[in-house]
Image: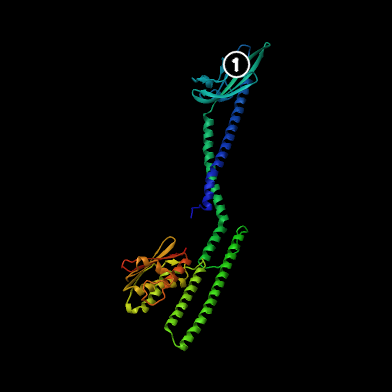
Amino acid sequence: MPYSPSLIRRFWLASALLLPILMGFSALVLHRSYVTSLDAAEKDALFAQIYALIAVAEFDGELMQLPAMMANPRFEMPESGLYARVLSDKQHLVWQSKSLEATQFVLEDSANCPRAGNSADFESHLNRHPHRYLRFGTLWEFDEQEFYFCFEVIHSQLAKRNEIGGYRRTLALWLGGMAFLLLAIQVAIVRWGLRPMRQVADEIKLVEQGRISQLSSRYPEEILPITESLNTLLESEAHQRNRYKNSLSDLAHSLKTPLAVIRSLIDDQGKDKQVDEQIERMSTIISHQLARANAEVKTVFGVETKLQPVVKRLCQALNKVYADKQLQFNVEIDTEIQCQVEEDDLMEVLGNIIENACKYGNSEVVIVATANADDIVVSIEDDGPGIANELSKSILSRGARADTGKIGQGIGLAIAVDILSSYNGALTIERSAAGGAAFLIQIPGAR
């Protein structure tokens, strides 16, 4: 059967593929929104600083003067990360803040001064560190003349980038935790939603084991049509089995009564050995055919039968039947091994084969059972003459026998094969270690 992943595993796989994409997209949107808001807030703050510089600036026609002490203390502190300059129309330095004067910074300008009333916002480097530049062009009138000055504020980006990095790490942590929590919640929801399906599976297993005959009706409306159809199928199968059994029983009675009459007439008129043998053969064939037909209509839902007690009862009974041979029965079967075969059928199969081993064995019969993953293999070996390879298959056919000198009609093994086939089992013949026959029975184990 090809491998098919469970619904939970499929959900895990789909979520593992989709959640990272959704969370990554959400992280990108949130990160960009956060960076955009920081940039906008920083730009507003830098414009406020420029407007404050323009408000306190004085121009006398020759020099642009600003107060010796600025209102913002960062303009007075060396390497404070906030700097200011005033440039002329030819970008000559007219004034600079003390925070810029006290350091040997190398400015790497990458933009010209804007026209009056316009601004220029760009990022460049100051001593190889990223800084944001905001320039604003102004016109000053003096004696009916206009003079151009560019007010510039420079702000370090290190603190902002550290803040963005911290936000990115926090965002990843929270979104990762949210993704894990969401996945766990979704799995819990799926498990809860699929619980009725697991209950259906459990009840079907109980039906297979013969503990219940019908599925319950307490299921959601989406599953109820399935359970009702299964119950209808089970009920129909049970009715069909009963009809077959009744028909077979009627057939058995109908056939046995004429045979009994013929036998009584023969007894009254004088017993004929050949006729008696043919009547006995007809009776045996009828029993075989009825057993075979009954095996063909077995239900797939059976009970669990422990193997060891059945084997021991058969050994005790056959030990009395073949007491004159003083057979030694060696049984190696674990007490916990169970098979999914009805006890009567198991008795029929094992009884025929163990009796065959007792009939042809000399002193010992060895019965060993091993349980595999899906089935159970029962080995029945004797120390008799064994069976030739060319006969190992033919004797499993109806009426065939390897030794015509023994009493019997030769149909016991064929009946065993028919019963095993109804349970998807099998019977094979090999050579035993003691030189006799080894019958290997494969039967389904309990699930």
Horizontally, residue 333 falls left or right of residue 70, namely left
Q: How many marks?
A: 1
**Is 194 situated above or below 173?**
below
Q: Nearer the viewer, residue 347 or 169?
A: 347
Colour convention: rainbow
Where's residue 412, x and y in %?
Answer: 42, 73
Q: Nearer the viewer, residue 222 or 131?
A: 222
Task: Give the image quarter of residue 250.
Answer: bottom right
Looking at the rendered structure, the kind of residue marked 1 is Gln
Which residue lies at the image location 53% right of the left edge and 44% below the top edge? Answer: 17
Horizontally, residue 271 falls left or right of residue 195, namely left
**Is 333 situated above or below 323?**
above
Task: Give the image quarter of residue 18.
Answer: top right
Can residue 309 be seen at all in this image of the molecule? Answer: no
Can residue 179 be seen at all in this image of the molecule? Answer: yes
Which residue lies at the image location 52% right of the left edge and 77% below the top edge? Answer: 252
Q: Nearer the viewer, residue 392 or 234?
A: 392
Label 1, on which residue? Answer: 65
Where's residue 441, x and y in %?
Answer: 41, 66
Q: Nearer the viewer, residue 69 or 244?
A: 244
Which residue lies at the image location 56% right of the left edge and 57% below the top edge? Answer: 195
Mark 1 closeness class: few <14, some 14–19, many ≥20 residues within 10 Å: some
What is the secondary structure assignment of the residue under circle 1? strand
**Is 144 situated above or below 264?**
above
Where's residue 230, x and y in %?
Answer: 58, 63
Outermost residue, right side: 144
Where's residue 1, x and y in %?
Answer: 48, 55
Which residue lies at the image location 50% right of the left edge and 71% below the top edge? Answer: 293
